[in-house]
Image (cartoon, rainbow, N blue to C red):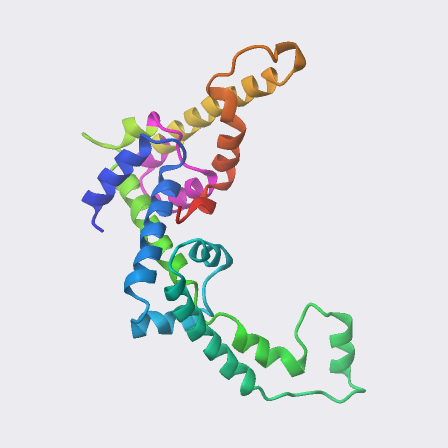
Amino acid sequence: MDQTTSFFDLRDALAQPGCPVCRLRARDTGRFLESLLWEQVNDPDTRQQIRQARGFCPEHTRRLAERQASLGIAILTRDVLHSLLDVLVDTQWQVPPRLSLKRAQEALDRSRPTVGTAELVARLAPQRSCLVCQQANSMEAIYLDTLLDRLLGEGGLLPAFQSSDGLCLPHLRLILARGRDRAVCEALVGAQAASWKRLDADLVEFIRKNDYRFRDEPWGQERDAWRRAAAALGGSRASEGE
């Protein structure tokens, strides 16, 4: 994806509720999952990467299971399962003497693998990151860089950003870490602060209307302020793939 495409995607996402990068990450993750299950199941390189990752992270495993692609999931998971079975069958046990310092240390800390299981634990662990996470993080970086590069100037994204809900805290940290231009960062932080002040005002009103003295007052946009605040602080990556 080039910055022209990501610019228009961001502009559209900024007009929608919530963090625009979370929204686009969720959309792109959903598209990638569909492509993976319907078009890449038999691709050797893809299968190799999934085997090395020992499947998928917990979140993307759940998202895969929610999709109506049982055959593709069965093929991919069976492939991973066979590689793990090979690890179990090839295990060489190493057991230290019963009366040894190592045995004593192992007995004191059961959160760490023993000499006998350390190698097996390491071989069962992912040898690379989740393939879906890699794709999502790659697209996320493109959107963050586009927002930085196209925020200011004629036809820039600043007006749309100022009118939006802004970024969630995780994406705000990420974009500021990538920022190199002081004017861009200052404009971004100023617009973000204004967005959070609007959210804070909605939270104040939400809390006030939960007081029994004001419960008969009609609800406005503050009705879902608590939900928006939770997403603003933690991000909404849980919606990926939907």
Q: 52 left or right of 229? A: left
Which quadrant holds residue 51? bottom left
Determine the residue positioned at 45% across, 46% down: 237
Which quadrant holds residue 107? bottom right
Above or below, 88 relative to 164: below
The image position of residue 106, as x and y in percent, is 74, 76
Which quadrant holds residue 18? top left
Q: 159 left or right of 132? A: left
Determine the residue positioned at 48% across, 31% down: 228
Determine the residue positioned at 44% across, 44% down: 239
* Tally of marks: 0
Q: 162 left or right of 85? A: left
Q: Compare residues 1 and 197 and report the one nearer the observer.
A: 1
Q: Compare residues 193 and 66 and report the one nearer the observer.
A: 66
Q: Name the magenta segment's main secondary structure.
A: helix
Determine the residue positioned at 81% across, 87% down: 99
Above or below, 170 relative to 200: below
**Magenta-drawn stretch contains 180:** yes
The image position of residue 24, as x and y in percent, is 33, 43
**Magenta-drawn stretch contains 144:** no
Q: Compare residues 141 and 211 and report the one nearer the observer.
A: 211
The image position of residue 83, as x and y in percent, is 46, 79
The image position of residue 198, as x and y in percent, is 45, 22
**Residue numbers of the magenta segment:** 162-186
